[in-house]
Amino acid sequence: MKKLISILSFGALVIIGTQCSSPKPAESNAQTEAQKEVSIKEQVANGAFLVDVRTPQEFAEGSVKGAVNIPLDEVESRLNEFKGKPSVIVFCRTGNRSSQAKAILEYNGIKNVTNGINTKTVNEELAK
């Protein structure tokens, strides 16, 4: 019985092990940030739709030049405003709401959506 359990346990480990992919090497933060900079900068140069998904009160305190305010809780009801844009860059305060907005947009067929994370990040990338 012990031998059977050992054989079954080993078989399960082999099956699980073959289904897992090997980990990819982690990119450095500097490399990831540099790639993102170019991407956002290029998108804006090509007419990206900049969308601040924070509340109107947060937006009034300052945002990214040229951005429009579509709060997260309105994104799904305002999908038509996103359609036909070459790309969309969503951002908020911490990246949480913009991540949710990106998921909503992609679920509804809006392609080329970038999570710009927050106003500081997008402003810094556009200034470089």
Image (cartoon, rainbow, N blue to C red):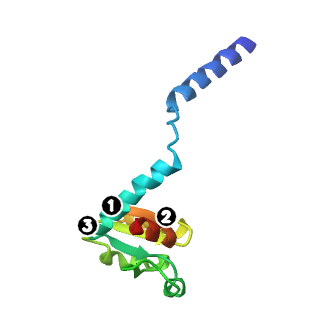
The label on residue 46 is 3
Side of 93 where 5 appears, left or right: right
Check if mark 2's residue and mark 3's residue have beta carbons within 8 Å. Answer: no
The label on residue 38 is none
The label on residue 112 is 1
Q: Residue at x 66, y 22 (%)?
A: 9
Report x, y in % for residue 82. Answer: 32, 73
Give above or below for 15 relative to 51.
above
Which of pointers 2 and 3 lies earlier in the amino acid sequence? 3
- The amino acid pointed to by label 3 is Asn
User: Between 112 and 45, which is closer to the camera in this rendering?
Assistant: 45
- The amino acid pointed to by label 1 is Asn
Q: Image quarter for residue 87?
A: bottom left
Element type at mark 2: helix
Q: Residue at x 54, y 87 (%)?
A: 57
Q: Which residue is mark 2?
A: 99
Report x, y in % for residue 20. Answer: 52, 32
